[in-house]
Image (cartoon, rainbow, N blue to C red):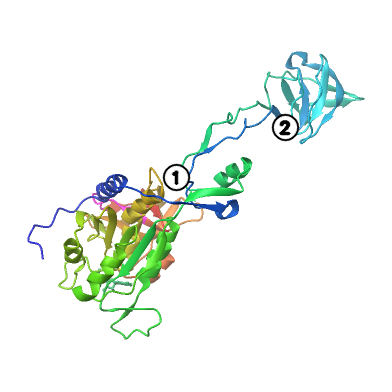
Amino acid sequence: MREAPAPPALPFEEARQIVVDTVRALPHPRTTETVPLDAAYGRRLAEALRADRDYPALRRSLRDGFAVHASDLPGTLRVRGELRAGEHAAITLGPGEAIEIMTGAPLPEGADAVVMVEHVTRVNGDVKIDRTAEPGQFINGRGAEARAGTELIAQGTRLDASHIATLAGAGRSSVPVFTRPRVAILATGDEIVALDEEPQPHQIRNSNSHMLAALVRRAGGEPSILPIARDTRAALDPLLVQGLASDMLVISGGVSAGKYDLVKPALCELGALFYFERVRIQPGQPAVFGTRAAKPVFGLPGNPGSSLVTFELFARPALELLAGESEPILPLLSARFEAPFRHKLGLTRFLPARLSADGQHLRHIPWQGSSDIPALARANCFLVADHDRESWNTGDSIRVLSKP
Ligand code: AMP
Ligand code: MG
C-alpha cells in the first residue's frame, strides 16, 4: 500500500479534460481495413475523402418550373421544349424564350434564372410570367456545393448517414476505415458470478462486463470480456496483465477504500501512473484514470450506475480518441423540471431521469442508489445536478446527459 496522501477529488469537467489531454498525447498506432460501403456506418474513416468532381458537376435547376433570362421578366415567353433530370441540355436559350425544366435538370446555356411552375400561366404554347426574377434564382451553380478536390470528410470522422451518402456520391463502394481499438473489460469482486451460474443470495450477477461491452461497442471499440477477478492479488494481477495487452483496459470494482479494493495497488506495481483517483461526482466518486505503457486504464467503481456514468464521462472520450476522433464531445441538453427537485450540495450528481417526448421536460426517477439497475432501466437520461445548487423549482432548467 502506498503511504502518499490521496490526491484531491476533481470536478468532472477537469477530470475529463485530463483524460482528453493525456490520451491525445499518447502514440496512436492505428491500423486500417477496407469494408463495403454498406458496412461502414459508425466506423472511422481512415483517409480523408475529397470531391471527385465539382458538386454539382454542372448548373442545375433547384425547382420544377421554367428556365428564363431574368431580364425578359415580367413578360410572355415562347416555350422551346422541356428538360428532364438526367437529360443533357444541348440547347442555348435565346431572348424571349423559356424552357420547361424539372428539379435536378441541367440548365441550358443562356438561362440565368428559374421561375417556379406555380408562378407561370400557360397561354397556348407560351408562358406568361407576371413577376420579376433575380439572376441566379433557383439555380445550383457548378461547384456551388464543393469544388473538385475539396475535402468532404476528414480523416478519423465517425461515419454517419450523411457521410454514407457522401461516400456513395463520390462512387466509393468500399471504404478504408481504422480498425476498432480493442478494449479489455475486467470485472472484479468475490461476490460476482458469471451469467451461467445461479447466484446465491449473497452473490451478484456480473452485469457490468456486459454493460461495459455494450458501451465500448457504442463508442466504436471492440470489447473483450476477461474472466471475473476475485479480490486477491493472485487472481487479479495476471488478469490485469492480460487486459493491459489490449489498447485500453476498463476495470469494474475494487477501486474504493475497502480492505479488498486491490486494483490501484496492483496497477501501481505493474507500473501504472494515475492522473486522478477521485472525482467530485455521484455516482462514481472513486473513479480512477491512469496509463500503463502508453495505454489508458480506467478503474470504475463497481455499482452499475457508477460504472455507467463514469464510463460515459471518462472512458468514452479516451476510446474515441484512440479510435480516431480529434475532438470528443460531451453532449449535454437542457430541460425543465416538471416538479421541484433538491439534492445535497458538494457533489455533481448524475441521476436517472425521464425526459418527455418533446425533449423539454424532465422528471427525476426515484432510485435506491447506484446499484439500482431497475431505476436505470426506467430512465431515458441523467439529470446533471450541479454541486453548488441545492434546489430547483418546477420550470427551472437543468442540464441533461443522454443515456447511452
Ligand atoms: P466495488 O466498487 O468493488 O466496491 O463494488 C461496489 C458494488 O458494486 C458491489 O457491492 C456490487 O454490488 C456491485 N458490483 C461490483 N461489480 C459488479 C459487476 N461486475 N456487476 C454488477 N455489480 C457489480
Ligand atoms: Mg469489489
Residue depicted at x 66% and y 30%: 57
Judging depth in this view, the residue of 181 and 73 nearest the camera is 181
Query: Is residue 323 found left or right of 36 in the rendered image?
Result: left
Extreme residue toward the right, this view: 124
Judging depth in this view, the residue of 113 and 231 nearest the camera is 231
Residue depicted at x 59% and y 53%: 38
Mark 2: give few (<14), some (14-19) or many (20+) Cα within 10 Å: many
Query: Is residue 26 found left or right of 353 in the rendered image?
Result: left
**Residue 156 - label:** 1
Residue 303 sits inside the magenta stretch: no
Residue 351 coordinates in the image, percent (x, y): 34, 60
Name the element at disc 2.
loop
Kindly identify the amino acid type of the residue bearing the numbered disc 2.
Arg
Mark 1: give few (<14), some (14-19) or many (20+) Cα within 10 Å: many
Residue 342 coordinates in the image, percent (x, y): 29, 57
Range of the magenta residues? 383-390
Residue depicted at x 84% and y 26%: 121
**Residue 63 - label:** 2
Q: Looking at the figure, which quarter contains the N terminus?
A: bottom left
